[in-house]
Image (tube, rainbow, N blue to C red):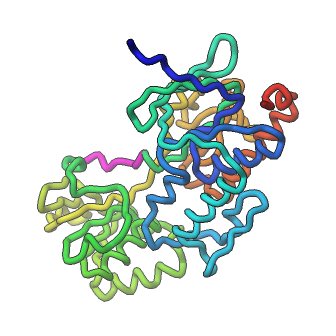
Amino acid sequence: MLQELQTHREPVIIIGAGPCGLAAAVELKKIGLDPLVIEKRNVVHSISRYPVYMEFFSTPENLEIDDIPFTTAGPKPTRLEALHYYRTVAQRKGIRMHTFTTVDRIAARPEGGFALEARRRDVRPVRYEADIVIVATGYFDHPNMLGVPGEDLPKVSHFFTEAHPYANTDVVIVGGANSAVDAALEIERVGARVTVVHRGEALARGVKPWVLPVFMAKVDKGAIKLMLQSRVKAIAEETIDIETPEGTVTLPNDFVLAMTGFHPDRRFLSEAGVVIEPEGWPRYDDETMETNVPGLYLAGVVASRNEANEIFIESGRFHGRKIAAHLLATGRVDALRR
């Protein structure tokens, strides 16, 4: 006999246990609600995938949630410090979480509220029902693809974790922002032969000012090769074709790191009934974070418009405060309290 599908009934569900999802959970707990946070991997999964030795651009006070101070050894928080901090926040605030659970679909129920179809550890089907759903899914699992032949080869990655595996290899890094520059510097230090390919006439304006001179000094000395106004044309097992203003250049190549950024999953929202504007972003109220679907809210980078990078932890951590204020203003809190 088939096992009956397990159903969890919750007043409020938050999808995503990143910093903005956790911040939203904390704000709702302050008004007497006890949301369930569903996360398809581990808590703050995106940060756990950052480069091992990465430092944040922000200072610690700009990454804090509620009244829990973020103390760091240096002026900029490290990846390890951030993992410890957000894990501590979740524990200290008693946030209920179902981790390693993927929500595949949100559907509005005819009688009100939402039904969520999910998979526990990508295998066991689970069903959730909620009156309010907050989507705080981020974007780190959806890289911007190059769209070239060979991008599916095992030697190509859109994530950089640490430099050691690339020692004594030929590496092409695609991109011109902080992630590309940081990866290039780390990989060059372990003895890799590094080429940075960027389609712009110059590196991105947002490259960290204390890193840019170090990077350019490496370029000037020939330790790192920088190819501007260029793009990857094709990737093969042992070579890579790069289109430059002077024509196509073929380089020996062992690995490609495509540091081309990421984007939110708009399809997930569209299937839930959220209108995607002609410009490509979801329809929601800036003051309340509620979408055109009543009871369905956004928090964090999933609410970005022009670019995913326009919303950071610094600003997205306050979206939960707007949502809590709206639930109070509409008189729904008493009915949602357990």
Q: Residue 207 in the image: x percent, y percent?
A: 50, 71
Farthest residue, direction left: 238
Q: Quadrant of residue 200?
A: bottom left
Q: Residue 287 in the image: x percent, y percent?
A: 78, 40
Residue at x-position 42% and y-position 72%:
182
Q: Is residue 176 above or below residue 299?
A: below
Query: In the image, is residue 172 part of the stretch drawn in magenta?
Result: no
Query: In the image, is residue 144 part of the stretch drawn in magenta?
Result: yes
Q: Is residue 272 visible?
A: no
Q: Residue 110 in the image: x percent, y percent?
A: 65, 11
| Relative horizontal placement of residue 234, taking residue 276 as reference (left or right) | left
Q: Is residue 212 visible?
A: yes
Residue at x-position 42% and y-position 45%:
142
Q: Residue 9 in the image: x percent, y percent?
A: 64, 25
Q: Quadrant of residue 173?
A: bottom left
* Majority secondary structure in the magenta region: loop
Q: Closer to the camera, 252 or 118?
A: 118
| Relative horizontal placement of residue 210, taking residue 290 as reference (left or right) | left
Q: Is residue 327 above or below residue 185?
A: above
Locate the C terminus by quadrant. top right
| Relative horizontal placement of residue 24, taking residue 19 as reference (left or right) | right
Residue at x-position 64% and y-position 60%:
88
- Write down the region rendered in magenta: 142-148
Locate the N terminus by quadrant. top left
Q: Is residue 274 above or below residue 94?
A: above
Residue at x-position 73% and y-position 51%:
318
Farthest residue, direction front: 1
Q: How many numbered markers are drawn?
A: 0
